[in-house]
């Protein structure tokens, strides 16, 4: 064992314990009242809002009632464009969520 | 008997339980404050401020703690970010050694001398290397754990530690003959 190793062993074994002396109370009193929402709630809100927004856009753009949506879907240009827009919006939301998870 | 850490974290995440968070602070405050003293050249006031800031940030973002690492490791990541942010905003002429000398002057507490001198020796390194050395030498974390904590490449961590050890050896050579205190 060389010099620095023996010195470090001494340091590790003699690490002082610091008494709290009001530290925890000071931390607790400095905490903000409202904490950030948990990440999964933020993600759920983001995806939910995107899905709801996409549905409204699809409904309005197609000019049809929700209950008739499925029966009136055809593969014309408008339908394909709206579907592409919805897929793009949903994918963007998912990418945002995944990036947030990684960060 | 200390309460189970995982249970405390779960209570904080699910029900914003301040009492549980206070227990987590109590359990980790000494180690974290010691680590920050090591990183700040044994500047006690600054270390305690950074420790407080670390716990406040932890409270705000504990929803992002996924439990795939130890709570303390996650806390260290936040502490390092606080410390690095403080270091970036510091005036260039302010050095940890100066702060240390201002605080302690000629007084000497032999029970703490070794820890203090080691902290001052660490202060010669840039923040990331300082943290890497501390986590490896004091906390005995692996290179991989340090790379994850500091979010930097494994090779950088290895290089920081190898070069840092050599420099520390020179800097602390006075302790070999017992005249370092």
Image (cartoon, coloured by chain):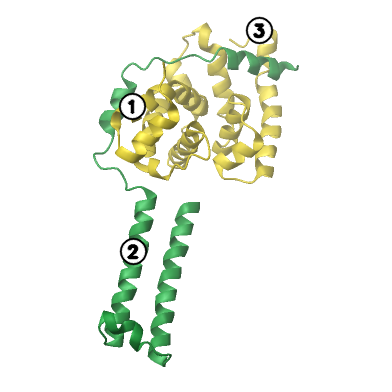
Looking at the rendered image, the disc whose residue lies closer to the viewer, 3 or 1, is 1
Q: Give the crowd class for mark 3: few <14, some 14-19, many >=20 residues within 10 Å.
A: few
* CB within 8 Å, label 1 to label 2: no
Position above or below: B120 against A60 = above
Residue named by callout 1: B22
User: Could you tell me which secondary element the residue under label 3 belongs to?
Assistant: loop
Q: Image point 45% across, 69% down: which residue? A: A91
Looking at the rendered image, the disc whose residue lies closer to the viewer, 1 or 2, is 2
User: A44 or A15: which is nearer to us?
Assistant: A44
The location of residue A76, given as percent across then percent down, is 41, 92
- Is residue B60 something one can see in this rendering? yes
Residue named by callout 2: A48
Q: To which quarter of the image does residue B133 belong?
A: top right
How far is the residue under mark 2 from the one under mark 3? Answer: 67 Å
Pointer 3 and pointer 1 on the same chain: yes
The location of residue B75, given as percent across then percent down, is 46, 34
Q: Give the crowd class for mark 2: few <14, some 14-19, many >=20 residues within 10 Å.
A: some
How far is the residue under mark 3 from the one under mark 1? Answer: 41 Å
The location of residue A44, given as percent across then percent down, is 36, 57
Looking at the rendered image, the disc whose residue lies closer to the viewer, 2 or 3, is 2
Q: Residue furthest bottom?
A: A76
Residue named by callout 3: B178
Residue A25 located left or right of residue B76: left
The chain carrying label 1 is B
Q: To which quarter of the image does residue B114 belong?
A: top right
Residue A72 located left or right of residue B165: left
From the rendered image, report the letter of the chain displayed in yellow.
B
């Amino acid at each position: 064992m060389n010099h620095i190793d023996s010195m470090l062993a001494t340091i590790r074994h003699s690490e002082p314990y610091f008494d709290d002396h009001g530290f925890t109370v000071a931390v607790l009193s400095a905490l903000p009242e409202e904490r950030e929402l948990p990440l999964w709630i933020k993600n759920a809100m983001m995806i939910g809002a995107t899905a709801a927004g996409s549905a409204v856009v699809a409904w309005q753009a197609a000019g049809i009632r929700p209950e008739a949506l499925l029966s009136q879907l055809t593969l014309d240009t408008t339908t394909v464009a709206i579907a592409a827009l919805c897929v793009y919006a949903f994918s963007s939301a998912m990418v945002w969520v995944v990036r947030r998870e990684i960060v | 008997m200390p309460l189970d850490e995982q249970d405390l974290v779960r209570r904080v995440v699910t029900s914003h339980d301040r009492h549980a968070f206070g227990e987590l602070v109590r359990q980790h405050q000494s180690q974290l404050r010691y680590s920050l003293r090591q990183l700040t050249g044994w500047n006690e006031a600054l270390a305690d401020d950074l420790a407080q800031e670390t716990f406040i940030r932890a409270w705000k973002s504990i929803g992002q703690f996924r439990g795939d690492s130890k709570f303390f490791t996650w806390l260290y990541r936040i502490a390092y970010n606080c410390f690095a942010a403080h270091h970036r905003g510091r005036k260039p002429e302010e050095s940890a050694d100066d702060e240390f000398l201002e605080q302690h002057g000629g007084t000497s507490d032999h029970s703490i001398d070794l820890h203090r001198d080691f902290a001052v020796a660490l202060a010669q390194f840039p923040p990331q290397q300082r943290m890497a050395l501390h986590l490896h030498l004091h906390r005995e974390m692996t290179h991989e754990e340090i790379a994850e904590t500091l979010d930097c490449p494994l090779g950088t961590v290895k290089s920081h530690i190898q070069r840092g050890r050599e420099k520390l050896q020179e800097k602390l050579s006075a302790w070999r003959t017992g005249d370092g205190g």
